[in-house]
Image (cartoon, helix red, strand yellow):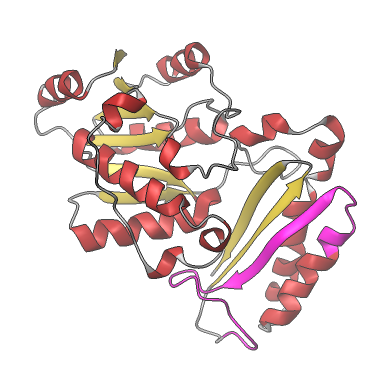
Amino acid sequence: MKIVTTIAEFRQVRRGYGFESVGFVPTMGYLHEGHLELIRRARTENERVVASIFVNPKQFSPTEDLSRYPRDLDRDFHMLAGENVDLVFVPSNEVMYPPDYQTTVSVSRVTQALEGLRRPTHFDGVTTVVAKLFNIVQPSRAYFGQKDAQQSVVIRQMVRDLNFDLEIVVCPTVRESDGLAMSSRNKYLTEDERKGATVLYKALQSAKSIWDGGTRNSGILRAAMMETLSEELLARVDYISAADPVTLEEWHGEIPRDSGLLLSMAVFFGQTRLIDNLLLE
């Protein structure tokens, strides 16, 4: 496994791959099993696998946890080497955003709801850094997790709109044995908060059982999630949603029988904000 820190060095190594297919997994580090599942999927579908580790400052607002975000590069490198990753790109802030940097990549409609309402600068930071990474890496396929459902929708829109020549692959959310979605931010939870955080998946499952029973009323589905969340005293709900999985527009009233549904939520446990979702066909 080769580790590079500059764009020039990365491109030199990348040119050596020629026309081999390249699977790319962008990360912010502090890897967990969810990241490794993306790596494994990339390995099965490509001749080469590239990962990046970059804690992108542009997707954090001044009130968010950039300085607290967990970092452990040696641990990350060990995990990536164990998955036979070919090349790891670990740029500094100065490499990605030099002093004269002036450009932002912005996607409009699908960034306005859900996370975009709470974090209005977040997706501009995501799309800007991902566009830069796509241009640097030149992957055949890029791999993202369903846990960040809105991010996947936004990136797919950007790829279509800007004619990037690659495939976006979205992989299922990887969960702990008790249902909690794996996240680097789970490290922030106290023991009691960690136990309480399982209520997110329980809330999603409560709505799913109603959906599976034939109910298509969005208000009933949201109420079921809220009722389950309210049973956990440590949970402080930021939002719950029952939205169209393509447009991310909130459903109101009856959901058409031929439409899918994205159930999603953001919930605070202390100062830690967790997100989770479930896609229903």
Magenta stretch contains residue 182:
no
- Residue 75 location, x and y as percent? 52, 14
The quadrant holding residue 270 is top right
Magenta stretch contains residue 237:
yes
Q: Is residue 191 shown left or right of residue 61?
A: right
Q: Nearer the viewer, residue 2 or 128?
A: 128
Q: Is residue 236 shown left or right of residue 180?
A: right
Q: Is residue 143 shown left or right of residue 223?
A: left
Q: Is residue 244 visible?
A: yes
- Residue 64 location, x and y as percent? 59, 41
- Residue 237 location, x and y as percent? 75, 58
Q: Which residues are magenta?
A: 228-255
Count of residue discs: 0
Q: Nearer the viewer, residue 159 or 210?
A: 159
Residue at left 64%, top 41%?
Answer: 175
In the displayed structure, 31 sits above or below 193; it is: above
Which quarter of the figure is the N terminus placed in?
top left
Residue at left 82%, top 59%?
Answer: 229
In the displayed structure, 14 sits above or below 185; it is: above
Residue at far front of view: 100
Residue at left 75%, top 34%?
Answer: 189
Q: Is residue 138 visible?
A: no
Q: Is residue 52 shown left or right of residue 103?
A: right
- Residue 179 location, x and y as percent? 72, 45
Residue at left 79%, top 54%?
Answer: 236
Q: Nearer the viewer, residue 59 or 146?
A: 59
Q: Nearer the viewer, residue 237 or 94?
A: 94
